[in-house]
Amino acid sequence: SPVPIYLDGGNFFSTGHYCLTSSMDFAPRADEVSSARLETRPSVYTLKEKYSRDIGCDELIIVQNPPHEHLDMWLKPVSESTVLVSELEDKSLAVLRDQFGYIPSQYLELQSLLNKKAQELSAYFHVDRLPMPLPYRGGFRNYTNSILVNGVAVVPSFTRFGWNYDDYPDAKLKSYYERKVEKIYRRHGFKVRFANA
């Protein structure tokens, strides 16, 4: 049965109890979703009802105006109660300051938005933060777009850009990122295998 939202690739997750999706169109707040104020947002109610009936979601979380419309580009459920959310660390931003003499505003905005979404999701889940490499040439590099299978997390590794012809600006942090990522996934019960992306 069709659902009244655009579903593409990684913008739908189920943790068992919760279903998560993203939207750029409306912004239901937690107090609206659980109260009589739903009458002012029938589209939210319809969506929740349809997801419940047709997909089996107990609760639907709509992430409004996310850092990337595909949740898997910055978010990874690892259990019914825990999600990993990317974090653009000050350590990464310092690379830009060293290179340009300042930090371009879009990186600060992305850092702020990731922090905001992590805070919003903490109302429903335990949130653990994964380091996020600097976006580069329009690419949203992350360690959340992983595959979890048989107790193993297959996680992207970013060695060089394109067909191996360009170093990433934060290449010197690659080992730091991957050590931290491996530690976090292991804490949640997964062995880690990196795949060159």
Image (cartoon, rainbow, N blue to C red):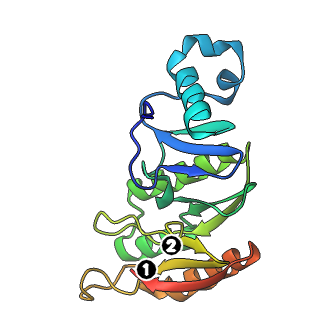
In the rendered view, would you say 45 is above or below 7?
A: above
Q: Which three-letter amino acid code belongs to the residue tagged 1?
A: Asp
Q: Which three-letter amino acid code belongs to the residue tagged 2?
A: Ser
Whether the residues at callouts 2 and 1 have beta carbons within 8 Å, the answer is: yes
Q: In which quarter of the image is residue 130?
A: bottom right
- Nearer to us in this view, 56 or 130: 56
Around disc 2, counting alpha carbons within 10 Å, would you say few (fewer than 14), some (14 to 19), or many (20 or more)? many
For residue 92, which numbered disc appears in the image? 2
Q: Quadrant of residue 165?
A: bottom left
Q: Which residue is drawn at 47% across and 72% down?
A: 133
Label 1 residue SS: loop
For residue 63, which numbered disc appears in the image? none
Left or right, 185 with respect to 24, comes to right
Distance of mark 2 from mark 1, alpha carbons? 7 Å
Q: Which residue is drawn at 26% across and 80% down?
A: 162
Q: In which quarter of the image is residue 139?
A: bottom left
Label 2 residue SS: helix
Query: Which residue, given by chain and number where applicable, does mark 1 sit on?
Result: 170
Which of disc 1 and disc 2 is earlier in sequence?
2
In the rendered view, would you say 185 is above or below 171?
A: above
